[in-house]
Image (cartoon, rainbow, N blue to C red):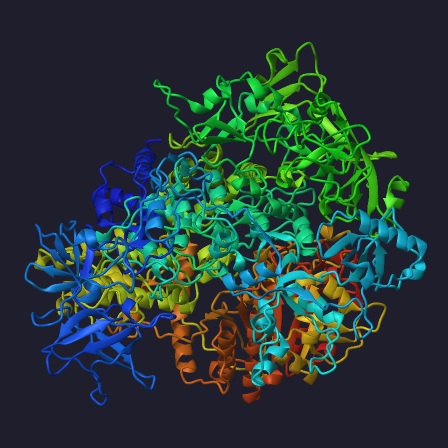
Amino acid sequence: SGQKYFIASYIDSDSGARRLTEVDEERKAVARLMQHGTFGTTLSDLEGWTKGPVTKESAAEWVKEQMNMTMTSHREYFRTRTNPRLTNPVRIGRNNHPCSANARWRKFTFSRKDGEHAGFAQTFEASYNEAVDHVITVKLNGFVRTTVKAIGFEDITKTFEFNKEYLMCHSPTEQVDGWFWLRLDDGSCTHLANPLIQFFPEATQPSYVVNIPNISGSLQVIDAEHSDGQELINTVALDDELCDTLSDITEQLDAPVHGMLDDGSFVLFDPRLVLQENTVANPESDGGGLIKSMTGDVTKCANVPRTFLNEDSCVLSNSATACSSSTAPDLLIDLNAENLGLLHELTGQYVYGILGLPVVDKLGEQLESPCTPGLRSRWEIKSAGECTATVLGTNTNASLVELLFESSDSNNFIRDINFPASGFACDSIDDATAEVEIIIGNQCFKRVHPEHMSVFDFTYWTLDHTHPGNMIAMMEGESNPIKKFRDEEGSAFLIFPSYPSADSDVPPHPLERWVTHGEKFPKLGRFGDTALFVDLPNEMRTDEVAEHFGDSTGTTGSAVVTCGSPGEVANDPTLGKYFIPVHEKGTDWGLREQKGDVFFNVVLNAQDQLRQRVAFALSQVLVVVDTATAIVGDHTEAYVSYHDILVRNAFGNYRDILKQVSYNPLMAENLSFIQSKSTAHMWEHQQKHAFADENFAREIMQLFSTGLYMLNKDGSHKIDENGEWINAYTNDEIMSFARLWTGFDYQEGRGNMEENTWFGNRIDPMRIEASWRDKFPKTDMTGGYIGDGYPLCVDLPDKMWLRRGAKYRLLGSKHTPELMEDDPAYKNDLTMKHFVLEAGSNLKGALCNADSNGNCQYAMSVTLESNLPCTGKECEADTARVVDVGEGIYYEYISPTCVEQAFYSNAKKIIFKDRMKDSSCANPLLAYASEACCSTGDVAAYRNPEYVYDQERVLFTTAGDRCVAMGKKLCDFNYINDLDHHKKGYHWTSDSCKIQVKVDSAGQTAIVYKPNSYNHLHPHIDPNNRNYFKVYWDGEYPINNDDSPDGNDCGNGACTALQTGGCLCDTSVFESRVFSRMPSSVDEVLSKLTIGAYDTLAYDDGTYSESVTENDVTAYFKAGEGFTADTVFEVTDKNRRSFRFKNSMEKVRVDGDSSLSFRNPPSFMSVLNTESTAGKAATETDAALDHYFYHDNTAPFLALRMIQRMVTSNPSPRYIQAVADAFTSGEYLGIGSGDYGDMAAMVAAVILEPQARDETLDNDPFDGQFVEQLLQITRLSRGLELTPGDTVKLIYFDRLKDRIGQAPYEYDTVFSFFLPEYQPDGTTKVGQATLVAPEAIALDAPKTVELMNGMFSMVKYGLNRCYGGFNHWHGSCYEDDDFSNSYAHLTHEMAWDQPEAGEIHADAVVRELSLILTSGRLSPTNFDIIKSAYLEKLPTAGHAAAHRMAVQLLLTTPEFHTTQTTISSGLARPEPAQPVSSGVPYKAIVMVMLGGGADSFNMLVPHTCTGAKDMYQEYNEVRLDVALPKGDLIELNDVSNQVCEKFGVHPQYENVASMFNSGDLSWFTNTGVLDKETDKHNFWRDTVTQLFAHNWMQLAAQKVDPFKDAFGTGVLGRIRDAATKQGRSVGGFAIDWSAAATSGMPGVNPSALILSRNGVTQFNERPSSDDMLYTIKLLNSDVKPESGAFSDLWADHLTTSLANNQRLYDTLSVKTTATEFPNEHLSRRLEMVAKMIDSREERGSDADVFFASKGGFDTHSNTLVNTDRLFGELDEAYGAFRQEMEAKGIWDKVTLITVSDFARTLNPNGNAGVDHAWGGNYVMMGGAVKGGQIHGTYPDNLTDDGERMLGRGRAIPTTGWEVVFKATAEWFGCAAEDMPDILPNMGSFPRADYWIPVADVFNI
């Protein structure tokens, strides 16, 4: 404290001592602070520092000042500057009025809006009658635009015709005499000069002319850079009598409005988009309703959905035009013929019911017997006379008749039944009977295909490349065979031709065809049923569909809740057109760079630099990959809105960040959990056994909160008893959390924000669709459940809705709830019985909150502060939903957060609406159903007419009391009389229920409800359900003997063994108290109690006695009781969270064996659909976020990430702990709120801790970091004051990502630009010290050359394209101080006032540059070198040129590229030696990484299997909707060593198949990372590799060294080392990015070179001096041992890169390929490999190893579509590479091997995607490969029962990468004695037959 930090300058004896003054030291310390906390030090930063010496305290003051700066919002920056032309109102907004203030006018006639646009033809005419006209009248669309003296085509060979209508063509150039184009009769286009707006007195005059006086300069030129000063803005409103007659809204075909200026000249009104202010603090007063009305509903309502972001600031609008926010339309659509036609008309989708699917096809293949346990069968309903009853066995007939008769299926056309696993039986003689007709009364039930009359969206099948008949029909001039049913026949049905007519040329379609293709079509439901709008495919969830079927955009009129959105400000017309939003009538393109433009212009100019810097650091932790979103391209607002989350909360709380990014639609697209649905929902609605998407569930832990391994507070890893790192979670937790991240969906689109051109909106936080959410308990990462610590709903006080803590949410005039679900019919039900609060109601008074005049002041939310007595009807209600407080105002009751135990006692049966509908079980202690009262012996029930309100729920006892009051009783009813259908819900019965548990072989459980009697159970709780979840068994659990060799006869007979697998057990619940004394500590409470308790003050007075506090634990006892299960303990944990726990533990025991038991799991979601609400899902989500947030790992994990991104790569444990402590304490040096997770405190610690502030650490050889490329550009730009040109508003950087590897928003993967754990290879000091250097992953020659060229260009020529410049603009490429043609240029320059004192001035210049660009770290040696170069340049070229030279040289120094100092040794770095060939025949290995985890079980697929089972059928059944049709597979030649003799490959794999069948390619099947041979029972203990994580498994595949025996090396590097030791010259190369695979042992080989796929760019093509390269090498000369490791690495990298770059440039510039490679990343990378191989002789190479990669394989959604593209690109790349190698005669010397992180799950998730798995299938190809083989062992069981299958089809590899690379290394020429070095883990595989001999793999 109070210590002054300064740099102790090193003294170099060769250059003399230089001591800096105290002022210099202070400025250096300030610069160093700016380096960490800003985007670059500026001179104003240095000169503006007034705090004296930079102590910890003064630095803290600067931090506080920065934190108090007004936030610069990226979204606001974009919106205020968004002022595009708009000739029509659009969904985003309206255009302005010509008489309004800030109206725009122009002098040229035609704009881009007047050009050629799809779907809208515009006509041009030049009217001229030579006899009478003196001028020509120019018209557009029939309206006069201007008059001219002459007009004609610029091409005089073309004849221009007057009085002829031409179509406009292309887009006009927007300035006078610019070009516009007309289409000629031959279809070609030709151009004319864009005329000036002018009207001659004798000419036709415009229709509307307003006078525009220039009042005090109100008329101003604007956007001069776009049109050379020909656009004007009038900043005041016009007062012209014509104004009131003009339309409020301009349309494209309206007559144009002209203006007359004071000088008599004319201008044309140029309408512009108007965006409204609609911020959180100031929401638009009517939600945009007036604008919506003015535009005829074209512009959408702008009212923002109420979410956690804005709910506290919403307002109640009483405007007559107010419109409510659009929620997902809560409407049902009848799936009938008329509506299917309407859906087609409204959306263009081809929606059909399907007919013709066979029960037995023409090949004799048939469906399973309808008696198959668990099978769902479908039956068409006919009249009895249409059928002939099938003769069946007695039991079969009786069972099917009962199931059909008792079915609750109400469809009028078909009936579905599920054959139970027990309780029903059929006769064995009927096992083979598939076709069945059964007559019951006057009805016949005919067995049909299970999808007969199902309704699908068949649009996919209409495309040319999908259905085989489409292309044939097109070529033959016939109709599309799928479209014709709708387009020609008007049919609602598509007929599957299983038995085509005799005269048809369509072949009979077998059952298999539907099985393989049917999964591709989104299913809407069954014909005759209803479908929820929200469950429609996305392409049909349009506004048009919602509005047509009865749902408007929401309530309109008074008492509407209106809300705003963060940063949704109005645009500012006076700023001009900087940006253009995407909308449906947009005419601009190429907008992809806009979001980056916003970023750069904000961070370079914003005052809140620290906030922006922190947000950028966070953006590299909480990454959204733009190419993984659905709007990648021209969209801007959604991306900048996402970034604003990080800006807004940079000094807030990380919990808020975590929640906001989790609810962000871009993040949900990025990590593919958008619209993820539960297993239950997918089965119930799609009949698919799909699982929840796991992507986000994995990454929110691995990347956003806990990391992979358990950490101590100082960031060190916790270890187990074997010294191994402890996993923070397992795949079980990932699967559990994946179920929690179901149900998230887009909010509906709205106005006033950039149009997304696709369903939903990507700015507002997502909504939760409760029906999609998984309803079952979820385990957490710490051995508990997500619901632990929350009170049980059954324990809440009676009438909780009137008690302390009850919360109410204002609905305004809306009378249906938002967080609970009511029947949609209630929205328009005028007879609805509301819960009206009576006069005198205490609750009404609390909600009214009347002022002194008695006027209600309705708050957005109200929380009761005390218990309220009930009044009138309130006393009869058990709970509330929506209450009517009068004046047309309603509030929704929000129940306190609570959980339900999955198992409970005394369950009662409830029935939904009537007996034919669902039956379920319910807890009688919860108000979840209504009464149903019968007279004795009657089955017709009634509700008590005195019920309080519609949709009321009551307790079971209340229901009984109400029945008694009617003289009736609860009954097991059939139906309810005198109640509208929509007013029925779940109703209590007198019947009881059993709650059973189904247990699978892994101990996972599913809940089964078993009422005493029922007609139908909901599928998610029936005996066949697969909704398994993890429980914590106390010991053993029941295992079916058929499921596992460890079976125990289902708990020694305590449970029933199910034929379909698993055990079904009856259960009982037992509660016991935990403590009989006061707990000894808080930790004891937290470790032993799991059931939460509610606030004891909410219970009636006297329920709890006074409290007792001991050992920091407070106990509340029930009055008159001691320690019981009802005792409540209150504690505060280490993170200052208060908890109340009930002194209770509940166990679920298996009846018949009490030793089989588990803790009763809690769940936020109710198993009942009606009670499983969006509100409960939201609280469950919050609980999960809290679990991540408060996890012990989160603080140190985030501390390390933030330190790495802002200060240093290898922080000390003390530094990490200090930052983690600040995070957990919420305070650092008085900064922070004191709350856990406070970002201000964390950031302060990051910036202010000694390791950040102590300048002496710059001299520590191992402290510091590389400066990332983007920050190098911003530091240069800010520091040297990059200033836009005179007519340019913004600074524009173009295509940075392709050139330097980094650009805003353009991430390659969710791991950001840099891997936090990346280590340079062992040839470097950094690598040898086992330090990480994340930024060094991008340290390669191509990116370095592009970076240096771009910065040099900016220094010399300004921001343009000259010689590698960072902008596309054509500038003046001469170093002559002419920056007039540049977008911007650097303006910093130190004035030279004393020409005679050049040396003194040079010293000052270099010192100032050093301060600004290196924080004064420039070494004495480098200082003098740059100073000498300055002085040398000064006399001949002047100060400006000398300054540019100094800047360029400084930009090459280690001190600029790292945060370290350099101590020169005075010796030049040796040039890399030119390799010399030893004459050994050449060989090359090419490793291709398929990044993201390739779905390789769709690369190699079983085809023909004559063994025990049909493996293709099993593949198809397991893969479901991601299975490839058998007929689409390309067949491979037979093999003899696998489970099938014939395999097929993906239909895109034509070259792969050809190479396999011709003997040049083999497969390695079920191959992957393997630490030792293992199985599903032992893999977790046999594996140290972190499974299923992208980064770790990619490294594992590249390194093949799981135990780190050859630390820091990769398998290719070790092969290269072994070959080098034999005396061979071996090159190592990675294309585009560095790769761990190519790293070798130190001292054996030079580091592998990184090459660009785009070729080699020449460095510094036009240097500023002839000896500039020599000077650069001097600046990066060799260093002393004590010099910085990072700076040494940079200097070595730069000098080596420049030397190699020149050699490669000289070599490759003359190399061409004989093959044209596709323009795709991998193809281009392999093309570079091919050129390098071709240059082997020039390079003196005997052998080479190459690494190339292709990303995009992380297909968590839409797998078939994505892999079709990806595999096609792979195949083309392989084919081109092989063709080129053959053309060059070297194919037999090259081996290409593919690897990947892992394969994908065989079983899909709910998004038609697949998740992370393990073993996969990979190819090896080359002329020496002994092809046509499949090595390894393809799994013989693809189901989860397989011995090598983990859950969801994750194959455990049988072949490790060691096998592949051992054979490859031997072929490469490595000796047997080298193998232990190449493959350090060989000894873990002792079986001799595990290894594949090289002679079996290669032709040798």
Q: Residue at x 39, y 64 (%)?
A: 1300
Q: Is residue 1118 above or below residue 1573?
A: above
Relative side of 125 to 933, left or right:
left
Residue 520, position in %: x, y? 63, 65
- Relative to 833, is 664 on the left or the right? left
Which is nearer the eye, 1697 or 356?
356
Q: Position of residue 108 (x, y in %)?
A: 18, 68
Q: Position of residue 38 (x, y in %)?
A: 32, 47
Q: Is residue 181 visible?
A: yes
Q: Is residue 1696 visible?
A: no
Q: Position of residue 184 (x, y in %)?
A: 30, 83
Of 876 and 751, nearer the camera is 876
Q: How many marks?
A: 0
Which of 792 and 1415 lies nearest the eye of the viewer? 792
Residue positioned 52% across, 53% down in the render: 549
Q: Is residue 1445 above or below residue 666?
A: below
- Which residue in the rendered view is the most extreme toward the top? 1120
Extreme residue toward the bottom, this view: 157
- Quadrant hosting residue 1146: top right
Q: Is residue 1513 above or below residue 792?
A: below
- Left or right placement of residue 805 versus residue 230 in this view: right
For the C terminus, the image quarter is bottom right
